[in-house]
Image (tube, grey):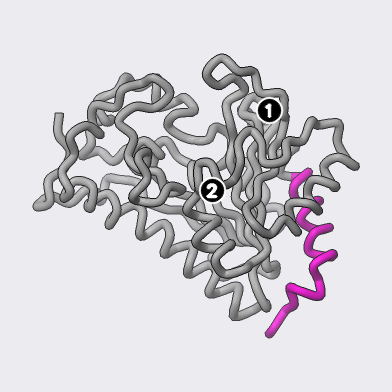
Amino acid sequence: MTGCTKEHQLLTAEDSLPFEIINNSRSDSPVLIVCDHASNYVPLALNGLGIDQPHLQKHIAYDIGAAGVSRYMAGNMKVMAVLAGFSRLVLDPNRFLTAHDSIPSISDGVVIPGNESLSAADRMLRVEELFIPYHMAINHAISYLLRHFSMPLILSVHSYTPIFQGFERPWEIGVLWEGDDGVASLLIDYLRENTDYHVGENEPYHACNPLGYTVRTHAESNHYPHVLIEIRQDLISDSQGQLEFAGLLAGALEMIQATLNTVITRTT
């Protein structure tokens, strides 16, 4: 099986869009939610990447429950959110394009035939039609917030599998950051004061390993307040769990905004 060649268009009118924007230009808050691994969608031209369909329902294809939490938060708080509309197996929007797992040929032991022996043109199609539009949507959202606030507050929402490579992860939620830990510290304190969850600090992995593209590029490099959260997937696999975590995080963000009020102010 081969991917699309350069003379072909990857996305057609029958495909899903490469991103979803919620509350586009209709936010009264500086908060921007981004969800890199919201979808398990594979463009039709890639024929399911040659893997068995059940694999697309697992954590290797997307962050289970993360999209639901992001949508509930955006709806309840009336804040902007940008969600990727394609599977991380097609191209991971949270990896630098030079990373070895940007387009994985194997993920958690599952071989991805549709990603093997890709030409430079095959890769570039995915970059041009998926990666770039998604990150441009984030840029547009940030530009809108900068016009109305002194700076955005960026929350990156992810989820993780309870057991990975035989290790049972003990944390219910992880708070990750790189460099500036101001928002992360506030969120950790809030979660520990208001829940009984075992909160991981830069767990289940460190924000720098693997290095994420989205927060580094859109937040860290611009010195915008930010934090990345990882929620254990079994806790948000249904709408009830997603609603509960959305409410919890909404409360945390309200506290964080109040604390950072001298930093983030309305400009119009």
**Callout 2 amino acid:** Cys
The reply, left or right, for residue 61 in relation to residue 2 is right
The reply, left or right, for residue 168 in relation to residue 134 is right
| Residue ID at (84%, 64%) | 259
Residue furthest top as drawn: 166
Question: How many discs appear?
Answer: 2
Residue 116 in the image, given as x and y percentages of width and height:
22, 32
Contact, mark 2 vs mark 1 (Cβ under 8 Å): no
Quadrant for residue 181, please give it: bottom right
Q: Mark 1 points at which residue?
A: 235
Q: Mark 2 points at which residue?
A: 35
Asked if residue 89 lies in the magenta stretch, the reply is no
| Residue ID at (78%, 64%) | 257
Residue 133 in the image, given as x and y percentages of width and height:
37, 59
Q: Bounds of the magenta span?
A: 247-268
Which quarter of the rendered picture does the C terminus lie within?
bottom right
**Callout 1 amino acid:** Leu
Residue 207 in the image, given as x and y percentages of width and height:
59, 45
Classify mark 1: residues with Cα within 10 Å, few (<14), some (14-19) or many (20+): some
Classify mark 2: residues with Cα within 10 Å, few (<14), some (14-19) or many (20+): many
The reply, left or right, for residue 62 in relation to residue 202 is left
| Residue ID at (82%, 42%) | 191
> Secondary structure beneath disc 1?
helix
Residue furthest right as drawn: 193
Q: How far apart are marks 2 and 1 (CA)?
A: 17 Å
